[in-house]
């Protein structure tokens, strides 16, 4: 990968997640090798003790069990130090009540990145937004350590954590059933079958009497995939 002019790298979808060793609020980690076999959401936030970030951490931590059920590990990062992280997470638990959430304990690791070593590997420092704070980046890393999706938000915009959960479910469902998901897809909605790759398959699809399949045209067919199927994908080895 070529660095950008501020010495940062911008990973791409399909890249192996850049590796790093780091100190976190849950001990040292080796990323991504410690999480082989799991999905990971690696996300950065601009700074500890700031309001948008506090609302985000409380929301993400309150959804921890939902991500664990999805075999997904959360890993946070900012370019603050370990003691700042610890003090901030203690304050959140002891003092902050927000949107019906209180006494929230953040149990996923929060990486200290004072040196910006990790932030630079992941393009989290975007000088047009800030040279001293990471933007709100989100990387979705699969069980083999491959970056499968990424989203960047500016400092002022708190993330929608239901959307981050939807992305994980959609990626896992696409892998399990070799399908794609249409705009605004939610688990239980119809999914898109791969576009016909030959005239024969196109004709077969258009002539199909399968009631679970609906073709809007030869290149755009959907099929039913129940919530039950999404929740219980076939085991693949
Ligand atoms: C916040 O999390 O509230 C925040 C952080 C950096 C800049 C602006 C807002």
Image: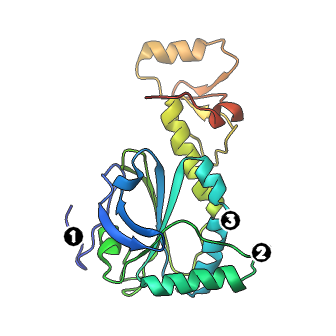
Image: 158 above or below 174: below
Secondary structure beneath dot 3 equals helix
Question: Label 3, on which residue?
Answer: 62
Locate the C terminus and report the quarter of the image it occupies. top left
User: Depth-wise, is mark 1 or mark 2 nearer the camera?
Assistant: 2
Image: 61 above or below 141: below
Indicate how the structure is coloured in the image.
rainbow
User: Depth-wise, is mark 3 or mark 2 nearer the camera?
Assistant: 3
Q: How far separated are the C-alphas under marks 1 and 2?
A: 41 Å
Q: What residue is at 49 percent from the left and 18 percent from the top?
A: 202
Question: Label 2, on which residue?
Answer: 99
Residue 47 appearing in the image? no
Give neighbour class at mark 2: few <14, some 14-19, many 20+ (Cα, 10 Å): few
Q: How far separated are the C-alphas under marks 3 and 2?
A: 11 Å
Give neighbour class at mark 1: few <14, some 14-19, many 20+ (Cα, 10 Å): few
The location of residue 11, given as percent across then percent down, is 32, 61
The location of residue 85, given as percent across then percent down, is 50, 82
| Left or right: where 9 falls relative to 56 | left
Residue furthest front in the image: 27
Secondary structure beneath dot 2 equals loop
Residues at badges 1 and 3 in contact (C-beta under 8 Å)? no
Q: What residue is at 57 percent from the left and 88 percent from the top?
A: 49
Question: Label 1, on which residue?
Answer: 3
Q: What residue is at 64 percent from the left and 72 percent from the top?
A: 105
Residues at badges 3 and 2 in contact (C-beta under 8 Å)? no
Q: How far separated are the C-alphas under marks 1 and 3?
A: 36 Å
Secondary structure beneath dot 1 equals loop
């Amino acid at each position: 990968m070529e660095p950008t002019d501020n010495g940062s790298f911008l990973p791409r979808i399909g890249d192996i997640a850049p590796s790093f060793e780091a100190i976190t609020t849950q001990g040292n980690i080796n990323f991504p090798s410690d999480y082989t076999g799991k999905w990971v959401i690696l996300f950065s936030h601009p700074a500890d003790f700031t309001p948008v970030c506090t609302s985000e951490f409380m929301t993400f931590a309150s959804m921890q069990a939902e991500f664990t059920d999805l075999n997904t590990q959360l890993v946070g990062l900012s370019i603050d130090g370990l003691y700042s992280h610890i003090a901030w997470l203690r304050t959140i638990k002891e003092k902050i009540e927000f949107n019906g959430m209180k006494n929230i304990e953040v149990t996923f690791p929060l990486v200290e990145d004072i040196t910006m070593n990790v932030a630079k590997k992941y393009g989290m420092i975007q000088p047009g937004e800030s040279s001293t704070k990471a933007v709100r980046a989100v990387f979705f890393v699969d069980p083999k350590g491959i970056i499968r999706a990424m989203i960047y938000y500016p400092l002022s915009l708190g993330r929608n954590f239901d959307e981050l959960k939807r992305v994980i479910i959609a990626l896992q469902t696409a892998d399990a059933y070799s399908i794609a998901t249409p705009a605004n897809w939610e688990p239980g909605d119809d999914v898109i079958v791969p576009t016909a790759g030959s005239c024969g398959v196109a004709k077969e699809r258009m002539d199909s009497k399968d009631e679970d399949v609906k073709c809007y045209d030869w290149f755009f067919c959907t099929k039913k995939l129940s919530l039950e199927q999404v929740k219980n994908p076939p085991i693949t080895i």
